[in-house]
Amino acid sequence: MKKLIDGDRTFTDGIVGQISASNATFANVLVPSAQNANRMSLSASILTMYNSIATDKALRDASDEAQSLYDKYSTESTMRQDYFALIEALAKRQNSSDAEDLDGEDARLLDMTYRDFLAAGLGLPEGEGRERYKNISDRIDELQTQFARNLNEDDSALWLTEEELDGAPRDTLSTWEKGTGENEGKLKLILRSPDARTVTQYLTNATVRQRIWVGRENRNPENVPLFEEAVELRDEGARLLGFPNHAAYKLQERLLDTPEKVESFLKEVRDRLTPKGEQDLKNLTEVKMADAERTNKEDEYLFAWDQSYYERKYQDENYNLDPQKVQEYFPSTIIIREMLAIYSQLFGLEFYEVKDADLDKLSPTGNGSDIIWHPDTQLFAVWDSEAEGDDFVGYLYLDLFPRDGKYGHAANFNIQPGFLDLDNDRKRHFPVTSLICNFPKPTANKPSLMSHDDVTTIFHELGHGIHNLVSRTTYSYFHGTNVFWDFVEAPSQMLENWAWTPVVLKNISQHYSYLSDEYKQTWQNENNGTGVQQPEERMPDQMIDNLILNKNYDIGLINLRQIALGTYDMTVHTPATHQEIVDMPLTVLWNQNMKNVSLMNSMELVVTDESKKWTWGHGQSAFGHLMGGYDAGYYGYMSSLVYAEDMFYTVFKKDPFSSEEGRRYRHTLLQPGGSVAPMKLLTDFLGREPNQDAFFENMGFS
């Protein structure tokens, strides 16, 4: 990383040493600078990605250090007055009679680069204020890197007995570490693992469910002061730049471009959802009260740690939906194969797995393991179909299973962007992207089996991957998902709808007992021997119908939680004064906000010490989004659904396999990346401006 930084600094020194504001042009300043940024991007993302994927802690630590160096240099480079003088001269000339004749992407690059410098503090006069802003930016980068490192390295866990784990799937428990010594006879549940989120839906013991839930809400206490310092510094920095708060600063480049617009959107959705959420809470409470086997018979309330357990019981009793039975139809190998086939048909792509001898051939060292960071990782070469020109598109990595030190959720990590090499006859550099996920591992007797939520997640994340693969931009600055933050989720959220489409569910499902004789024997052993009838090979129509009928069950509670997270984000980033954020009790606010907006009861009804009523947990310390780029932007997960559902209902609902519409979507909406304003992309694709009709219809509202 130091070599990259030194090279970039020397390059910029050369530009400012040879060019003055009077003779600066787009061609002699921004074009070579963009080319240099393209080249730097080829290595920078790889060096900083290891902190999320490497098994070697020393390598993760080195990657963290590389990230820190890169962040500090990014701040330094965007505060160079000498280089900014050239960009400012170009920007001002572009608004005069001497404007250069720039095409759309060139003009947008100049405009966005100028805005970036102003946002970095170059609009401030040289002196104490600008230096303070630089120090603030550097410190925020440090805080965010440490926050993420703490999340990835977190090893907090509970040791639980077999009795305490009554009801949990045996397959899940078979992958947990077995205790020794004082933990003999117990199993280790890592609180940051996906299992900690999913196992509670099966545990019959309410006290154990509570321990797990409270444990997860109290992870990473060391992150509490990091978050507090970050939000205070963000507010101070925004005020130095002349903004009333951090949200006003961040929302400049958004579809909802003011705090007032965001707050209005969140309020409208909250008002529509709250009556539904109240009814959902009442329904689930009744299910709990009717449970004759519940272990906490004195409780009169439904608690947060009860929610998934009684959702599952309700689904099983009313829709005959047992999540374990559903999961048996979703082996990850089949889901990946069929999902790639769907995306091939829609977007005109072909996916070829690169393995064994072909992997060795592709590796510069001749050793395929050098370009695969873990044995679980798969690599695919992606090509255009014959109808699309039969050209190479890029590479896709899949890293699907959890391991120590790995990023703990599911995400698309772009490894190298695509761009045109303007120094080499405009040849395209092809993108490399990856999906980093944490789906259930295969066991000795069973394949990896995905829940329906997992299936929806992989359709979503590959949507980001497709965006990065099919984007065609001149500059890496605009490649793929480098779009406005409150638009970036929309293309992927739209593709989640395929996981709720009956014909798709039928096609992508296959009961794992049909994959091999060994798996069939496993299924028979778990279902009382060889005499029992093997399930249908494809998911039964009734199960599919019930799955879809259940889609909007407790949609009020589910989405109110999202609104609660977005509301917390906006509250901490819109204080009326700087002193208000300094004095704001962020932990108390977190717990009160989650109760008041999401409606869900938790420890405030359990703790007997009144002084701890709202300080029993600190969920914000594990809310990585607000320290990973989504600050004053978490609302985008909900607002982008407006665009996602509008696109699906308007264009794809009548025929989700339409190659014609899929390729129009690819070329109109995905291919430009961030080189075209997102509202224009949406309007061009829909033939009109987007509206909220489908968004509310999808939630069950008229």
Image (cartoon, helix red, strand yellow):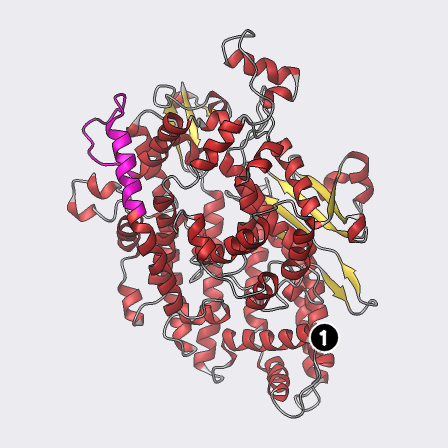
Query: Does the image show residue 547?
Result: yes
Does the magenta-highlighted stretch encompass residue 294? yes
Foreground: 320 or 640? 320
Query: Does the image show residue 58?
Result: no
Q: Residue at x 56, y 51 (%)?
A: 492
- Image quadrant where one finds the N terminus: bottom right
Foreground: 408 or 102? 102
Does the magenta-highlighted stretch encompass residue 697? no
Q: Residue at x 42, y 58 (%)?
A: 635
Say which residue label 1 marks: 31
Relative image position of residue 375 (x, y in whole percent) = 66, 35
Q: Residue 441's image quarter?
A: top right
Locate residue 586 relative to residue 234 in the image: left or right: left
Relative image position of residue 504 (x, y in whole percent) = 59, 37
Is 531 located above or below residue 316 in the figure? above
Foreground: 447 or 55? 447
Q: Amino acid at mark 1?
A: Val
What is the secondary structure assignment of the residue under circle 1?
Answer: helix
Q: Residue at x 81, y 53 (%)?
A: 389
Relative image position of residue 480 (x, y in whole percent) = 64, 59
Is 86 located above or below residue 272 in the figure? below
Is 446 located above or below residue 524 in the figure? below
Foreground: 340 or 276? 276
Is 570 located above or below residue 328 in the figure? below
Relative image position of residue 357 (x, y in whole percent) = 81, 35
Q: Residue 478's image quarter?
A: bottom right
| Residues drawn in magenta | 276-303
